[in-house]
Image: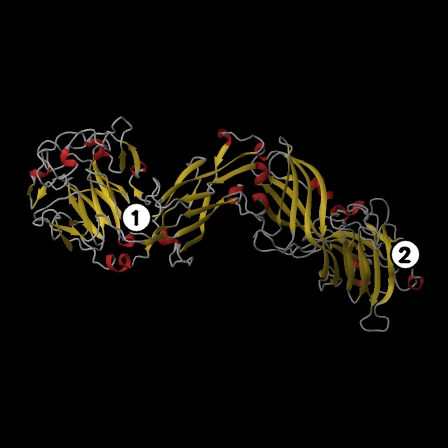
Amino acid sequence: MNRSTFHTIGAVAAVAVMLSSCAKNEVISSRRPALDPDAIAFSVSSGFVPVDMPESKSGGQAEEKPAVLLGDNGDTLYLHPSVVPNERGFSAAPETRGVPIEDPSGIDSIFVTAKINDGGSEAADALYIDAEKVTRIGEGGTIWTTSEGQHFWPDESTTLDFYAYANIGFDNNSPAYAKNLVCENGKLGFSYISSGSAGSDAVRQPDILFALASASRSQTTDGDGTVDLNFQHALAGIQFRAKNIAGGTIKSITIKNVCGQGYCEYTLSDETTDSGARMNGTFEWSKLSDKKDFTQTMLVKVNESSTLPDGTLQDVTTEANNKMTFMMIPQSTEGVEVEIELEGDLDKKTYTVSGKLSGPDPSSPITWEAGNIYIYDISTDSINWTYVFEVTPTINMVLGQTSAPYTVTSYRFRTQLGDSEANREPVPWTAINTNFSESNFHTGDKENITYNDVVTSFVYSGGASTDSFSKKYNLEVVGTKMHTTWDYDEKTLRGESSKGTPDNPYNLATDDGGDGNETTANCYVVNAAGYYKLPLVYGNALKNGTDNTSAYSGGNFKDYKNKTINDPYINNADDATLVWSDGFYMFKDIKLDADKKYLTFHIDPNYLQQANAVLAVRDANDDIMWSWHIWVTERDINKTHSVIDWFDSSNTFELMSSNLGWVDGKNVYYNQRDIAYEFTQKGSGKKAEMVVKQEGREFDYKDVGSTYYQWGRKDPLVAMRNWDAVGADDYRLHETGRSDYGYDTQTGGITLGDAIQHPNIYYTRAKTEGGENWCKDNITVLWNNYDSGGQDESTFS
């Protein structure tokens, strides 16, 4: 309203009004047409100094660090932020929302309050112009004046403080409004409220503007009484562009968890014009509250980026779509999220990607400053590409297994082109170990052992461009450790000094393990860990270093091909192998020596226990040529018991203290191991877990036991578990060198050569009239210690 008391004071003055938005001051040059020379008038222009914030690097999306990593569904929304000053002035009527003001031509009016600043006199801060509407003089004019009558300068030296604002409402029914406006002491303060519920349409938020100036008439430009007001933007603008995206429609953008209320104080700066007038100000926002979501309904079409020149940016909320700019209260982006809804052109699927909003460094939030427009370039891998990432979910290693395959499938394809091999690209991946534990199977306690102690081979990354889309890898681990409740396993056997070395194995066919005169056998006894060897000789065909021809002469003994044995030595062996052992992991490195004259093996001290094993040599066709029984025991077999023949007291015999292959009653257990890996696909951030269980087990061998022999055969069969279970499947579990080397039964009536090739098989009688022995040939020296003449003689088999 007009203050008539001031109309007659002093000379008439004019005030120029500017709009802040760039580093330069673009003051409208045309001044005071047809206006009283002492009247106050206004000229509109703008000016702004931007906050320094680097733009994101150029280049392909693969090289850029995403500003946002999404959690849900593994989608990645890349937001490449940059900041520009809000270089727009007035552009439209105050009721227009969500539109950055561009230039003075479209604005209808501004409002100005003026107070006298008389340096401490009683008239200081006296109201001079009370929130009057200021309008343009003439269509397209550059000078503005109060609409309810002219106001005049009091005199040449009296200073007036001007408080101007535009494009802001004070009606609490408006979507966004100010209240409690205070203009005093060079400060303009107000509370700003964005009303409405969560999900308020951001287009309803205006671009509000303020200007401050302090001048006397003599300090105005050219002394003509026109004071320049430089309008500045109180809010921050948020805009989006499409940088690398599949063709489709951006349906909406929502900025979440932003404050909708706050108090703003705009303070006059000390900046002066050449003539001494003060102008411009700084914004300070405080008391931020009422966090809510702001949504823009876009329906903006974007083209498939792959069809455009590299680096092409498509406007989403800029240029032609600038009416969709988010006008936000300046605040930190900490905790602020963005959600973008897109619909693909071809698949017509709606994709929602969301994540935290930040600056160039995704881990560091920035603060939106008043007067800046923050432009975020959208790149959406989840829309451009469909990522496929599959990993073998579980591996279960049975007892004795030390390696297992797993498969990783990692590739992507253009979503709108479909999944075909020609459209696939391998995607790199990495893996980390996330869990490892070994539990004592007997007590349940955790063992003091680490991941690196167990895992010997694992691939931690893959998916390079040279890799296939789906590739097999191998996980290798050490065998689970054996524990036993038989004290002599732990104390006696493991207490013995290890024998032999890898280069000089202990010779089981000599008394001292050296290379002296050899006496061979079908069974060798071992009572310590170490490296051993045995000569490739048929049974006991060597005695004290010379041929023991009585052990194989006569033509009744055959080799594995049913050919008569005429020589002690086994020739043309190709390799050596474990047939079976009921002591898991104990027998290792079973092989032939360089000259193929000896079978060598290693007994691992970590798995040493009372046990039995059968080792063999094979020909080039992997047929077993001969095999030997290895009995691991702490017992001294040289300590014997003398017995007398009941029928002939002159005959005495020496018997061992236990059966051949004796194993004392005990519990044997192997710990279970649990291993877990987390795989991560690059680009998509997809994760997959692989859980590995290396089985543990406890064997209840509470009863004593020993190996079994089929009459007339040289090789033992695996012992029973306990005496209370004697079924066909109640034998002790055993490690085998090949899957078909485990204990089995078959119908007999075979040759001696067949039996030699299959030392693990128990042959039953044939179901024929009168029955039939396991060996179809009648070789009497295999069955008893009497020859065909009935004389009491030893069998030399």
Extreme residue in the right direction? 4
The tag on residue 548 is none
Label 1: which residue?
A: 585
- The residue lying toward the viewer, choosing from 385 and 595, is 595
In this picture, residue 493 sits left or right of residue 178: left
Q: Quadrant of the C terminus?
A: top left
Residue 261 percent coordinates (x, y): 75, 57
In x, y percent, where is residue 198? 74, 50
Amino acid at circle 1 = Tyr
Q: Residue furthest top?
A: 769
Of residues 460 and 424, the one nearer the viewer is 460
Q: Nearer the viewer, residue 266 or 157?
A: 266
Q: Residue at x 16, y 36 (%)?
A: 782
How far from the left and from the top, in percent, is residue 270?
A: 71, 64
Q: Using the image as rendered, state which of residue 531 and residue 358 is in the foreground.
A: 531
Of marks 2 and 1, the one in the foreground: 1
| Residue drawn at 35 percent across, 41 percent down | 727
Chain-order first, disc 2 or disc 1? 2
Determine the CA span between mark 2 and mark 1.
106 Å
Q: Amino acid at mark 2?
A: Gln
Q: Is residue 387 left or right of residue 276?
A: left
Q: Is residue 535 above or below residue 557?
A: below
Report which residue position mark 2 lands on: 150
Q: Residues within 10 Å of mark 1 (few under 14, many from 20)?
A: many
Q: Residues within 10 Å of mark 2 (few under 14, many from 20)?
A: many
**Element at badge 2?**
loop
